[in-house]
């Protein structure tokens, strides 16, 4: 009986982890090493509920954890043309489902508007804790960003 329970729990764990794949997709025709700067597109930072601000802070930290230097979006015009050619715009999305959370961070070339890379972090506690799911997904996307922009 114990063997059946252990096998069942193992299968649940495998199923849960297979549904929470974290990955990065990078354009094949782009040299990521040329990019030095990132600017997070304003997602109405000051209009989000206060309890969500901690997650926004963690997303900023995730981008700062890479080699990219964060630039305030209101200061982009102060960059030289050469610096602007090395700038990525960053847009993120958070999808909170009942059973898992997914955080996606997309990097877009500033001058061309072309998507360059997309990093995805997913995490699940099988519905036990939504906040733990979000924190776990942010940690996983931070790892993907750091690996994409070492």
Image: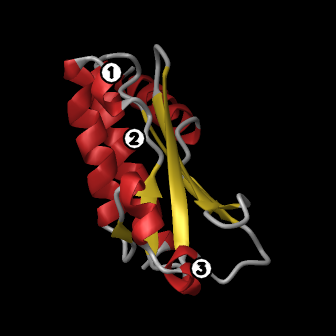
Label 1 secondary element = helix
Instruction: Answer whether labels 1 and 3 touch (C-beta < 8 Å).
Output: no
| 63 relative to 149, above or below | above
Q: Residue at x 27, y 25 (%)?
A: 52
| 95 relative to 78, above or below | above
Q: CA distance from mark 2 to mark 3?
A: 24 Å
Image position of 97 (left or right of 116): left
- The residue beneath circle 2 is 137
- The residue beneath circle 1 is 47
Instruction: Answer whether labels 2 and 3 touch (C-beta < 8 Å).
Output: no
Image position of 35 (left or right of 126): right
Q: Residues within 10 Å of mark 3 (few under 14, many from 20)?
A: some
Give the mark nearest the N terminus, 2 or 3: 3
Question: Can residue 120 be seen in this snapshot?
Answer: no
Instruction: Answer whether labels 2 and 1 touch (C-beta < 8 Å).
Output: no
Q: Position of residue 37 (x, y in %)?
A: 44, 72
Q: Which of 91/18 is in front?
A: 91
- The residue beneath circle 3 is 32
Q: Residue at x 32, y 21 (%)?
A: 48
Q: Position of residue 3 (x, y in %)?
A: 41, 30
Q: CA distance from mark 1 to mark 3?
A: 32 Å
Question: Toward which corner of the image does residue 136 lie, by quadrant?
Answer: top left
Give the mark nearest the N terminus, 2 or 1: 1
Label 3 secondary element = helix
Q: Position of residue 132 (x, y in %)?
A: 27, 29
């Amino acid at each position: 009986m114990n063997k059946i329970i252990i096998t069942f729990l193992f299968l649940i764990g495998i199923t849960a982890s297979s549904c929470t794949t974290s990955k990065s997709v990078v354009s094949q025709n782009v040299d990521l090493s040329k990019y030095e700067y990132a600017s997070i597109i304003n997602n109405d930072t000051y209009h989000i509920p206060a309890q969500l601000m901690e997650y926004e802070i963690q997303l900023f930290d995730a981008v700062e954890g890479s080699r990219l230097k964060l630039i305030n979006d209101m200061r982009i015009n102060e960059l030289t043309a050469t610096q602007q050619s090395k700038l990525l715009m960053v847009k993120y999305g958070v999808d909170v489902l009942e059973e898992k959370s997914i955080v996606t961070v997309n990097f877009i070339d500033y001058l061309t508007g072309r998507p360059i890379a997309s990093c995805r972090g997913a995490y699940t506690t099988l519905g036990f804790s939504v906040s733990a799911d979000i924190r776990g997904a942010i940690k996983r996307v931070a790892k993907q960003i750091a690996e994409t922009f070492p």
